[in-house]
Amino acid sequence: MKRNKVIFGLFLVLILQACNQKEIYFSYQTIPSSGWNKDSILNFDINVEDTIFAYNVLIHLRHFGNYPYQNMWLFLESKKPHDNIAQKDTIEFFLADDFGKWLGKGSGALKEMPVLYKQQIQFPDSGLYQLSIRHGMRDSILKGVNDVGVRVEKID
């Protein structure tokens, strides 16, 4: 019986590792409990080594139930390695449906919402890509946001 548990545990670890092999980057930055200042920029440095494969880039948002809006606007700037010219982008996504029910997953007051930002892109150069994110809401101090993350995953 004990041997079966050990074998099952090893099998589970191998399965979980296989699932994460597609992920080349995943990092969160925590927002202060006082709120996300409109001037506060979150910077993510993404090291890309393989330019042959296509990738998906996702933005993850963790928020509390007291987040005051149904949606979120984000302003993003990305820079390629050895390039000072930033590509700017704006995205909007919904955190709640028309009836106020949160769309993300999670238990208790904290919900997590992954949002597909870029789909099936190929990075032209290897090196360090920089992605900067700030909120585009009207509030100077945005309450209810806990973490913002970026995940880059390889597509087979």
Image (cartoon, grey):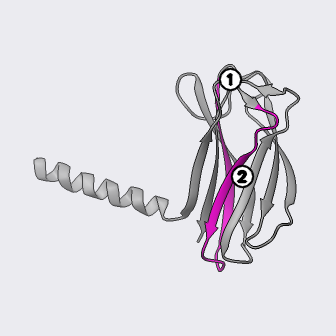
Residue 104 in which image quadrant: top right
Amino acid identity at mark 2: Leu
Residue situated in front as seen by the camera: 9 or 41? 41
The residue tagged 1 is 34
Does residue 49 show up magenta in the picture? yes
Amino acid identity at mark 1: Ser
**95 vs 12: above or below:** above
In terms of secondary structure, what is the magenta stretch mainly? strand
Question: Circles 2 and 1: CB distance less than 8 Å?
Answer: no
**Residue 41 percent across, percent down from the top left:** 76, 44
The crowd level at tag 1 (other Cα within 10 Å; few <14, some 14-19, many 20+) is few
Secondary structure beneath disc 1?
Answer: loop
Does residue 35 show up magenta in the picture? no
The residue tagged 2 is 116
Which residue does the image show at 66% across and 73% down from the upper left? 127
Frontmost of labels 2 and 1 is 1
Which residue does the image show at 47% across and 59% down from the upper left? 19
* Image quarter hosting the C terminus: bottom right
**Residue 23 percent across, percent down from the top left:** 55, 61
In the rendered structure, which segment of residues is drawn in magenta? 37-64
